[in-house]
Image: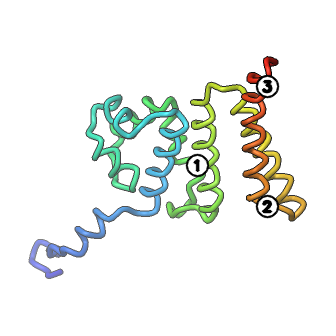
Amino acid sequence: MTATATGPVHEHDEDDDVKRRAPRGIDRYVGRRIAEFRVARGLTQEQLAQLVDRSMNDIQRLEHGSRANATVLWRVAQALGCEVSDLFQGARPDGDLPADEPQARGERIMLEIGRAVGRINSPEAKHALLELARAIADGEQRGTLNLADLSEQLGSTLAAPARRRQAGGR
């Protein structure tokens, strides 16, 4: 910075430009929340892009922490059926990512599991998944989790309805 008779003159610093454009913690957090809401609604990035009149690349960049203006955030929130404030819910006051990152990953996995189960039509398969989830939870609580045994159990559970149908019963 140099001074003139009218006051200080700010010199252009390329590092400042890079810092201004680089995603901050809050940008990454909002991007992750957008992705979570999108997955929970069963939308692809392409579908969300169409709903908000943006390109799929725009949505990808947004979900990875690219900054968005208020209009884009408002359109995205409307398309996702939430309020703009929901995209910021849980953010730390300093704008950085929350410390509970593993919990957030677990929540995303639960959303993806729910989405996948919602696409299953077979009541037998849904029941088998329920039994598998219960067996895993019970095994973890008892400290006896054995995935090989669970795999066999799941195979037997899925095969049982087919065996009943072949035997003429239901």
Q: Residue 136: give x, y in percent of width and height.
A: 79, 52
Q: Residue 85: give x, y in percent of width and height.
A: 52, 41
Q: Quadrant of the C terminus?
A: top right
Label 2 neighbour load within 10 Å: few <14, some 14-19, many 20+:
few
Residue 164 — which label?
3
Q: Please say if the residues under marks 3 and 2 sit with CB atoms less than 8 Å apart.
A: no
Q: Is residue 77 left or right of residue 111?
A: left
The residue that disc 2 covers is: 146
Closer to us: 79 or 91 = 79
- Disc 3 on helix, strand or loop? helix
The residue that disc 1 covers is: 108
Label 3 neighbour load within 10 Å: few <14, some 14-19, many 20+:
few
Q: Residue 110: give x, y in percent of width and height.
A: 64, 46
| Residue found farthest to the front | 167
For the point 28% across and 31% down, which residue is it? 53
> In terms of sequence position, does the residue under pointer 3 or pointer 1 come before the other?
1
For the point 84% across and 57% down, which residue is it? 139
- Disc 2 on helix, strand or loop? loop
Q: CA distance from mark 3 to mark 1?
A: 37 Å
Reply above or below: 18 against 136: below
The residue mark sitting in front, 3 or 2, is 3
Q: CA distance from mark 3 to mark 2?
A: 28 Å
Type of amino acid at the residue the image marks with label 1: Arg
Type of amino acid at the residue the image marks with label 3: Arg
